[in-house]
Amino acid sequence: TGSSDAPVREAALWSVALGSLVDPADRTVYLMRLAEDRAAEAQLRADAIRTLANVRENGVVDGLVRILESEPRVTIALPSRMPTELEIMNLRYAQARDVAGWAAGALGHLDARIALPLLLRTAEDPKDFFLRQMSLGSLVAWNVPEALPVLVKGLEDPLPDNRVLALTGLARLGDPKAVDPVLARLSDAHAEVRVLAVRAVGHLGGPQVRPQLEAMQQKESDPLVLGALEAELSRLAR
């Protein structure tokens, strides 16, 4: 059969994997085969991985680790500050097909701590911000001290959403060694990052960071950030 038959074959395989043609006990095997099959369409593979993220059966974690270790990395360009509708569509298209990214997220959802060393590496992937994002999200959910240096590096990630994740993770860890790098994010160009930085600084530094927050309050103009500052300063005063 020619390459034009590929979508038909893939759709049939997907139907078999999820439909009534297969014994439920065999569906995980079909899904894993699809997820690992690089000849299959990336969207189907990612869909299979998202389904496997809810399957706690033998072999699933090992298969996802294999995928994350061996999957060729893709380059997903960072979105512009004000992306157009077309840019947003292209971005979502690329993310939906990022097999490695979805594998990193699935391992986090499955609480597969065996994958911790791998996720610590993929959270710093230089090419794929979505893979970094999914890896950081898993590390934040796990709240493990081994992630501290990776989360600190994440504060410099060019994507604001990833900096927010890093701040969330550092606040959860509660390690005061992260106070200084978090303080630097009080001047972040993005308001949503500054909001999280205010909360994280207050949580990590306690009353000792009041002077920095008060100085920021005198210069800040964004209402959301000002609200976060007011709430944090009020909490620290108690």
Image (spheres, grey):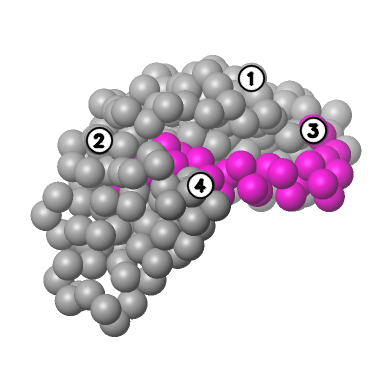
Alpha-carbon span between mark 3 and mark 1: 23 Å
Marks 3 and 4: which is nearer the front? Answer: 4
Q: Which residue is mark 1?
A: 184
Secondary structure beneath dot 4 equals helix
Q: Is residue 234 above or below residue 81?
A: below
N-terminal-most mark, 4 or 1:
4
N-terminal-most mark, 4 or 2:
4
Q: Which residue is mark 2?
A: 66
Q: Residues within 10 Å of mark 4 (few under 14, many from 20)?
A: few
> Depth check: 221 or 54 in front?
54
For residue 71, what is the image quadrant? top left
Alpha-carbon span between mark 2 and mark 1: 37 Å
| Residue 224 location (% of width, % of height) | 77, 48
| Residue 14 location (% of width, % of height) | 38, 65
Chain part drawn in magenta:
80-107
Marks 3 and 1: which is nearer the front? Answer: 3
Q: Which residue is mark 4?
A: 3
Q: Amino acid at mark 4?
A: Ser
Q: Is residue 8 above or below residue 230?
A: below
Residue 99's disc number = none
Residue 145 visible in image: no
N-terminal-most mark, 2 or 1:
2
Q: Amino acid at mark 3?
A: Ser
